[in-house]
Image: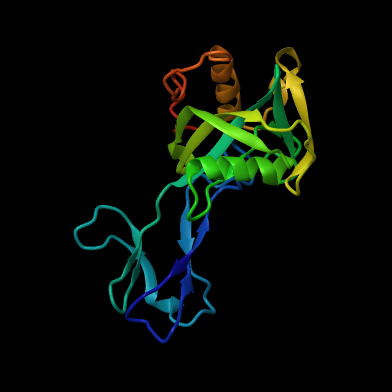
Amino acid sequence: MPVNCPELGRGISLTIVLEMPGRFAAKSDDAEQERSTLTIPSHLPGADQFSTRVPEGDNRERMVCGDCGWVHYVNPKIVVGAVCRLDDRILLCRRAIEPRHGFWTIPAGFMEERESSEQGAAREAMEEAHADIRIGSLLAVYNIPRISQVQLIYCAEMNVPEVKPGPESLEVRYFAWDEIPWDELAFPSITWALQQYRQVWNSPSFAAFTNPPGETGASTPA
């Protein structure tokens, strides 16, 4: 993300690299990092001015410019996705990327700047499955503090049935409920979303779900 340090000036826009787990990571992976770190590419002018320390008046480490005191704050990532339904079948995508390459997921990913959560969920469905969807009610809000994620999952209906894999998917297909490959789902929150969606399958209105009881998102799944 671009960072403009006013004292460094000279028209330099530094890039802070947040080394987080892979895209939409919500289950452990051998290469997954449990703790985020901040680095600045050392070849950039002014990069040597930044260090990790606790700023005055704060209570945790931040990336701080030693020249002007500018503080770079890193906030949790927002993931958006949708349980997409066609009649009595659910759309799933088999991942072509790590983490969890080859496992099944609903269309979901990180929000982009200057889009609403609904727009982001629809975009992810189009990118991952070329799926034209109609976003409905908010199904759930999940907190995954272990990897600093908040996930917003929507209910959605297909506008048209045609789908095909996008660059991040090996294949995409519709599953009847008894066909869902539960043992091959990529992340715990995918299981949560599908099971909670089933509870409100034909409900016109309902309160959004949260993490299931006992699932705090704070520890690494087994």
How is the rendered protein coloured?
rainbow
How many labels were placed on the picture? 0
**Residue 119 or 91: which is nearer the viewer?**
119
- The image position of residue 175, as x and y in percent, is 75, 21
Quadrant location, the C terminus: top right
Please indicate whether residue 61 sits to the left or right of residue 99 in the image: left
- The image position of residue 41, as x and y in percent, is 53, 72
Identify the residue at horizontal 40%, vertical 51% (top origin): 75
Whether residue 26 is visible: no
Residue 201 placement: quadrant: top right
- The image position of residue 132, as x and y in percent, is 68, 38
Please indicate whether residue 57 sits to the left or right of residue 101 in the image: left
- The image position of residue 176, as x and y in percent, is 74, 17
Identify the residue at horizontal 39%, vertical 72% (top origin): 50
Whether residue 84 is visible: yes
Where 185 falls versus 168 (above or below)? above
Residue situated furthest left in the rendering: 57
Identify the residue at horizontal 78%, vertical 42% (top origin): 165
Identify the residue at horizontal 38%, vertical 83% (top origin): 9
Residue 91 placement: quadrant: top right
Please indicate whether residue 25 sits to the left or right of residue 76 in the image: right
Please indicate whether residue 58 sits to the left or right of residue 174 in the image: left
Residue situated furthest bottom in the rendering: 10
**Residue 142 or 58: which is nearer the viewer?**
142
